[in-house]
């Protein structure tokens, strides 16, 4: 007897087919072929501005067509979806709200209802510009964190540090961001101290850690940026639809 397909299982089958279609389409246009999963490899270091390529634009058009026409949600790429893509992208860039300033977010706001048009026209420059601002803030924050290691934190002061800032407001000023990072560095030192490290030892460990983070900021490639943005777009349809490409590092700006 043939077992009838249930209503619950059908969407998942379509999701799987959709994800496969996106991955294969991207592989063909980007000049890659699907291969077995491998360890994440960081991109080559680059000190210049990261720009989208013609290949990225071709893939963006194809993925947008696949998502809008073949995804089971059948959601139109309009202003409502644009705002969701915008929020998803901000979450991917700085979900813990520890790098970007409120003034940066205010600048980004002009694209809230334009993401749909940008995706349709494959104009990726705004998304790359937003990512570039994050890189700039990353460098500033890590450099500041390293400078804070010149002075041992005062643990006699009664204060608290909230690491999860996903529901907090974006820091309004550089001074507010500096204070946030002062507490963050102090918390890192405290964690090492409780693990038995002396101040000089903790100082050295954290300096190396922050320097590694700084190095990783400059190892982000155009493919990293493109995947981050396209995933923000595809996740609006559902969290199981991903843009996948080979060898793309994730969370390169996170701790």
Image (tube, helix red, strand yellow):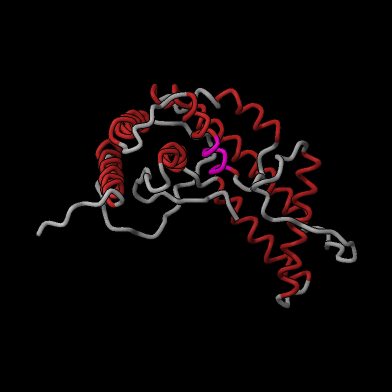
Q: Could you tell me which residue is drawn at 31 percent across and 38 percent down?
A: 72
Magenta-drawn stretch, dominant element (helix, strand or loop): helix
Looking at this view, is 244 or 52 the one in front? 244
State which quadrant residue 32 falls in: top left
Residue 134 to residue 8: above or below: above
Q: Position of residue 153 (x, y in %)?
A: 83, 62
State which quadrant residue 223 falls in: top left
Q: Could you tell me which residue is drawn at 71 percent across and 41 percent down?
A: 169
Q: Position of residue 208 (x, y in %)?
A: 64, 61
- The answer, for residue 59, to whether it is visible in the render is yes
Q: Could you tell me which residue is drawn at 37 percent across and 44 percent down?
A: 241
Judged left or right of residue 31, residue 80 is right
Q: Where does the N terminus fall, quadrant-wise?
A: bottom left
Residue 79 to residue 32: above or below: above
Q: Position of residue 85 (x, y in %)?
A: 49, 34
Q: Residue furthest right?
A: 156
State which quadrant residue 196 falls in: bottom right
Q: Where does the C terminus fall, quadrant-wise?
A: bottom right
Looking at this view, is 52 or 11 the one in front? 11
Q: Residue furthest left?
A: 1
- The answer, for residue 32, to whether it is visible in the render is no
Residue 33 magenta-drawn?
no
Judged left or right of residue 92, residue 152 is right
Q: Position of residue 83 (x, y in %)?
A: 53, 30
| Chain part drawn in magenta | 87-93
């Amino acid at each position: 007897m043939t077992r009838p397909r249930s209503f619950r299982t059908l969407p998942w089958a379509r999701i799987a087919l959709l994800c496969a279609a996106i991955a294969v389409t991207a592989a063909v246009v980007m000049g890659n072929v699907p291969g077995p999963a491998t360890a994440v490899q960081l991109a080559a270091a680059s000190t210049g501005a990261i720009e989208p390529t013609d290949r990225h634009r071709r893939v963006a058009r194809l993925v947008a067509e696949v998502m809008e026409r073949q995804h089971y949600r059948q959601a139109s790429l309009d202003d409502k979806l644009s705002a969701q893509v915008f929020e998803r992208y901000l979450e991917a860039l700085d979900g813990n709200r520890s790098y970007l300033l409120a003034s940066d977010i205010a600048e980004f706001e002009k694209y809230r209802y334009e993401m749909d048009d940008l995706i349709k026209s494959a104009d990726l420059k705004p998304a790359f510009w937003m990512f570039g601002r994050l890189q700039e803030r990353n460098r500033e924050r890590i450099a500041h964190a390293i400078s804070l290691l010149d002075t041992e934190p005062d643990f006699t002061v009664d204060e608290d540090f909230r690491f999860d800032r996903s529901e907090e407001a974006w820091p309004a000023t550089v001074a507010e961001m500096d204070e946030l990072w002062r507490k963050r560095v102090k918390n890192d030192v405290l964690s090492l101290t409780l693990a038995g490290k002396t101040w000089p030892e903790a100082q050295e460990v954290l300096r190396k850690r922050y320097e590694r983070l700084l190095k990783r900021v400059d190892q982000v490639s155009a493919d990293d940026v493109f995947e981050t943005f396209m995933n923000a777009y595809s996740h609006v349809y559902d969290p199981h639809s991903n843009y996948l490409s080979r060898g793309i590092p994730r969370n390169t700006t996170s701790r």
